[in-house]
Amino acid sequence: MTQKTQEKPTSVIAIPLADPSVPFPELTGDEPCRQYPDFWFPEQGVNAGPPKALCLTCPVLADCRAWALANPHLAGEGIWGAMSRAERNAVNRNAMRRAA
């Protein structure tokens, strides 16, 4: 007689595609990131200061930063809102600590 083994059901973690309360910034095409797209993804160990400095001149800086902080799974790499991934992660960690 063959014994059937019961398989454990797999759980699914649903990650929303984007946080609907923080829309992606409306871009006009004049933003620095639209003019130099590869510049915002520096290689590991490369100085991220120049792209961050250009970011600080952008008219949608605040909206871009808010979107990146609200959507870390979509803005995983690169400079968003004049912040690196490590800086965004630190801001999100601190916000979670304050909320706890």
Image (spheres, rainbow, N blue to C red):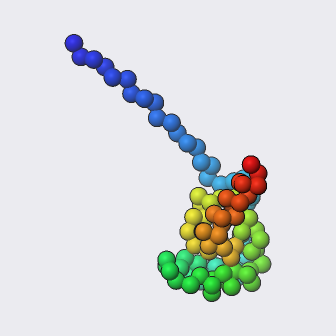
Please name the residue shown 55% across and 76% down the image: 41
User: Quadrant of the rendered structure where residue 63 is?
Assistant: bottom right
Label total for image: 0
Instruction: From this view, report whether residue 45 is shown above or below residue 23.
Output: below
Q: Which residue is found at the position 31% from the left and 19% from the top?
A: 4
In the foreground, 52 or 26: 52
Instruction: Tell which of 2 and 16 is nearer to you.
Output: 2
**As drawn, 83 above or below 70:** below
Q: Looking at this view, is 58 or 82 the one in front?
A: 82
Whether residue 16 can be seen here = yes
| Left/right of residue 80 with respect to residue 39 in the rendered view | right
Q: Is residue 91 left or right of residue 4?
A: right
Q: Position of residue 50 (x, y in %)?
A: 63, 87
The residue at the point 71 percent across, 60 percent down is 94
Q: Which quadrant would the N terminus be assigned to in this image?
A: top left
Q: Position of residue 88 (x, y in %)?
A: 65, 66
Quadrant of res 54: bottom right
In this rendering, is residue 25 above or below 10? below
x then y, percent, for residue 45: 50, 80
What residue lies at 72% left-to-right and 54% top-to-bottom?
97
Q: Position of residue 39 (x, y in %)?
A: 57, 82
**Residue 68 versus residue 14 in the image, above or below:** below
* Residue most extreme to the left: 1
Q: Is residue 35 visible?
A: no
